[in-house]
Image (cartoon, helix red, strand yellow):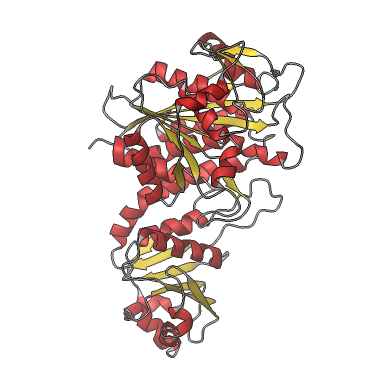
């Protein structure tokens, strides 16, 4: 997987500053005082740093933004990056500052002078998250970027605070790598193999093959993949960091490694983007990696349904009727509404086998959620105000946009079938809601449940604050925080 940029924390060493040959980052606050390291830089630059700090140009910067001074006199550095950083900067500002430095530094070594900076670990996290470059398929990948060192007042404390954040960044990178990977490389088999490798982190991982799924009655999941040469699979990942026998949180992810739409074939334009239709499974995988990396004191099980939706002589057809693992029958109206057919069996299996404390599923499920919410927010649907509020709070704290949308019995009428228990689509009106109503039928009685439709946030055409263009890793940070806040005991 794409490796994180190594970031180290060290005591302030004023003698090293003048001779540093890469980029030098200095954190300043308009109207504030220069600390000892900044005074040293200012003296070497013959007062240029102080003049910049007092200038209107610097005062007009938003917190977390940067002005760069190239090839400063008196220093060996190729540039001094001066950040507007209030001493009481909040998490968002600190992460924005780190992200801005990641974009500026290129391949240069970076030395940060952050003596009085609060949230220095968040600065490092922002830099690590934005310093991502997917190069697995470049014939001439760029060389690894230079080192990053943060000089601060309490390096041991900063290291301790940054360690769990870097576990989140690693999980997000894993999600991004999976989501960015082309479908001829990330087949269902290759995906499962990458997850099995996480046994080395302490996860218990098992792969259910098609014969196992047949015995379990996962007919809707198998039906989606039956038109492809790639075998359908379900991968189960267990992290047992909580008390023995304590009910886990269950995370279920849609893992359609490529979605042509099947017989209900998608238009050709933009179909190449359907490599990201396994984004829900990618997030579940990244969360499980993060929990293992930081040793979360919780029991969490992650299940991903891995299929490929292809048209062939063996593919499911509009009009087919399929029985779910639960026992309900589904009339397939549109084979491009396949994610819910995958998830309904995986969700039922998760509840049947693990009797979880709560259930959360993630999927790039509907284009309708993009029409409603754009690319700023994931759609959130839930039968539990308590669980939903806790998730929305976690998402807001991590800066990952999420917006709750309604559920209701009135929408069920759109799913009525003449010949089966339900249809797999409810038409154009409220498409994201009717998809959620479909999934809700596979949530067992009294089970707190959230459905996250991440079609608009899993991969972007433009860069975001903490990610370049492409896969974002949305959801890893929010779900990790939810586990920490609600499911870790002691």
Percent x, y of residue 245 = 28, 22
- In the displayed structure, 351 sits above or below 22; it is above
Quarter occupied by residue 352: top left
Residue 177 in view (yes/no): no
What's the residue at 32%, 78% (across, down)? 35
Tell whether 47 sits left or right of 365: left
- Residue, far left: 490
**For this rendering, which residue is in front, 320 or 2?**
320
Decide which of 469, 37 is in the foreground and name it: 469
- Residue 371 is left or right of residue 65, and the answer is right
Residue 456 location, x and y as percent? Answer: 57, 44
Most foreground residue, 220 or 431: 431
| Residue in the picture at 43% in, 88% down | 51
Residue 210 lies, in percent from the top left, at 59, 15
Specify the quadrant that holds the C terminus.
Answer: top left
Position above or below: 73 against 270: below
Q: Residue at x 69, y 34 (%)?
A: 184
For residue 155, what is the image quadrant? bottom left
Q: Is residue 270 left or right of residue 181?
A: right
């Amino acid at each position: 997987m794409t490796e994180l940029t190594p970031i180290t924390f060290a005591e302030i060493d004023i003698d090293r500053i003048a001779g540093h040959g890469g980029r030098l980052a200095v954190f300043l606050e308009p109207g504030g005082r220069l600390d000892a390291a900044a005074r040293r830089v200012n003296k070497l630059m013959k007062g240029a740093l102080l003049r910049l700090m007092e200038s209107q140009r610097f005062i007009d910067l938003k917190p977390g933004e940067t002005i760069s001074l190239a090839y400063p006199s008196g220093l060996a550095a190729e540039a001094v990056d001066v950040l507007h950083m209030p001493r009481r900067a909040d998490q968002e500002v600190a992460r924005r500052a780190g992200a801005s430095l990641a974009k500026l530094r290129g391949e240069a070594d970076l030395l940060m002078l952050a003596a009085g900076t609060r949230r220095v670990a968040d600065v490092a996290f922002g830099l690590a998250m934005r310093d991502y470059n997917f190069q697995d398929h470049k014939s001439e990948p760029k060389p690894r970027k230079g080192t990053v060192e943060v000089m601060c007042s309490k390096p041991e404390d900063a290291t301790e605070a940054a360690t769990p954040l870097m576990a989140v960044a690693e999980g997000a990178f894993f999600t991004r790598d999976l989501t960015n990977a082309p479908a001829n490389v990330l087949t269902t088999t290759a995906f499962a193999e990458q997850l099995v490798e996480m046994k080395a982190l302490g996860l218990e991982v098992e792969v259910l093959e098609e014969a196992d799924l047949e015995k379990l009655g996962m007919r809707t999941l198998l039906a989606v993949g039956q038109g492809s040469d790639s075998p359908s699979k379900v991968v189960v990942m267990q992290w047992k960091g909580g008390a023995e026998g304590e009910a886990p949180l269950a995370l279920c992810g849609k893992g359609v490694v490529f979605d042509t739409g099947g017989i209900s074939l998608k238009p050709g334009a933009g179909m190449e983007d359907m490599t990201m239709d396994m984004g829900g499974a990618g997030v579940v995988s990244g969360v499980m990696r993060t929990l293992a990396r930081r040793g979360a004191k919780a029991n969490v099980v992650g299940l991903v349904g891995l299929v490929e939706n292809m048209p062939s002589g063996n593919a499911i057809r509009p009009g087919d009727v399929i029985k779910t693992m639960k026992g309900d029958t589904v009339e397939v109206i549109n084979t491009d509404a396949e994610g819910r057919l995958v998830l309904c069996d995986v969700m039922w299996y998760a509840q049947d086998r693990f009797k979880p404390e709560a259930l959360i599923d993630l999927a790039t499920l509907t284009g309708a959620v993009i029409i409603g919410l754009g690319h700023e927010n994931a759609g959130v649907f839930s039968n539990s105000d308590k669980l939903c509020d806790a998730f929305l709070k976690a998402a807001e704290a991590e800066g990952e946009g999420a917006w709750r949308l309604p559920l209701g019995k009135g929408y069920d009428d759109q799913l009525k079938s003449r010949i089966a228990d339900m249809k797999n689509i409810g038409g154009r009106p409220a498409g994201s809601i009717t998809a959620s109503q479909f999934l809700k039928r596979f949530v067992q009685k009294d089970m707190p449940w959230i459905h996250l439709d991440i079609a608009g946030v899993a991969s972007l055409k433009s860069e975001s604050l903490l990610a370049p263009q492409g896969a974002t890793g949305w959801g890893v940070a929010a779900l990790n925080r939810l586990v920490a806040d609600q499911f870790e005991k002691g």
